[in-house]
Image (tube, rainbow, N blue to C red):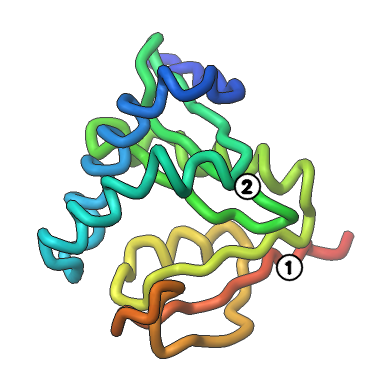
């Protein structure tokens, strides 16, 4: 039986690593966000490094020595979770969420309603829907579902 690859989580090394994270973001968005027009993808990509990344605590996931994904946390909320398409299904996203939950057991996350893969992912990990917004945080017509992790009582 083959051994599952070891996922290594670490803090982001700083701005010099941002281009790699943007590449991961683009790969993940191409695989999961088919509802986003290309112009929106490009606009968001230009805002990641200068605006969004500095606002969150970034954790980088490495698999086989390569950056496979990352998460961004702020005040008990998972603001970002992106896994490079080449590493999907290998436990990278689950490892990043587990690390966030270790710090914030009642972690919250907003998920694009038009991304059913992400909705199912969070539901499988024990997140419960608490609400819905008709637009995203920039007021665009991409509804968000609001989730909170509901720890299972022993």
Q: Please tell me which residue lies in front, 134 or 98.
A: 134
Query: Which residue is the site of mark 2?
Result: 73
Against 103, residue 142 (above or below) is below
Percent x, y for residue 50?
Answer: 42, 40
Against 7, residue 121 (above or below) is below
Q: Secondary structure at mark 2?
A: strand
The residue sitting at 36% across, 40% down in the picture is 83
- Relative to 22, 62 lies left or right: right
The residue sitting at 45% across, 20% down in the picture is 62
State the residue lying farthest toward the right: 154
Quadrant of the drawing holding the N terminus: top left
Q: Earlier in the sequence, mark 1 or mark 2?
A: 2
The residue sitting at 58% across, 46% down in the picture is 55
Q: Secondary structure at mark 1?
A: loop
Query: Which residue is the site of mark 1?
Result: 150
Quadrant of the drawing holding the C terminus: bottom right
Marks 1/2: CA–CA distance: 18 Å
- Relative to 142, 132 lies left or right: right
The residue sitting at 17% across, 50% down in the picture is 30
State the residue lying farthest toward the left: 38
Percent x, y for residue 54?
Answer: 54, 40
Against 63, residue 142 (above or below) is below
- Relative to 69, 107 lies left or right: right
Dividing the picture into quarters, in which one does residue 119 lie? Answer: bottom left
Q: How many residues crowd around disc 1 within 10 Å: few (fewer than 14), some, or many (20 or more)?
A: some
Percent x, y for residue 114?
Answer: 29, 75
């Amino acid at each position: 039986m083959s051994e599952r690859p070891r996922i290594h989580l670490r803090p982001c090394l700083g701005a010099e690593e941002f281009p790699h994270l943007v590449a991961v973001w683009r790969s993940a968005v191409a695989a999961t966000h088919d509802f986003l027009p290309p112009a929106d993808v490009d606009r968001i990509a230009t805002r990641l490094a200068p605006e969004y990344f500095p606002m969150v605590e970034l954790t980088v996931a490495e698999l086989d020595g390569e950056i496979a994904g990352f998460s961004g946390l702020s005040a008990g909320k998972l603001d970002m979770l992106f896994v490079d398409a080449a590493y999907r299904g290998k436990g990278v996203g689950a490892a990043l969420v587990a690390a966030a939950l270790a710090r914030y057991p009642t972690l919250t996350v907003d998920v694009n309603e038009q991304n059913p893969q992400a909705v199912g992912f969070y539901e499988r990990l024990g997140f419960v829907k608490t609400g819905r917004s008709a637009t995203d945080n920039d007021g665009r017509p991409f509804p968000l579902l609001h989730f909170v992790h509901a720890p299972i009582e022993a």
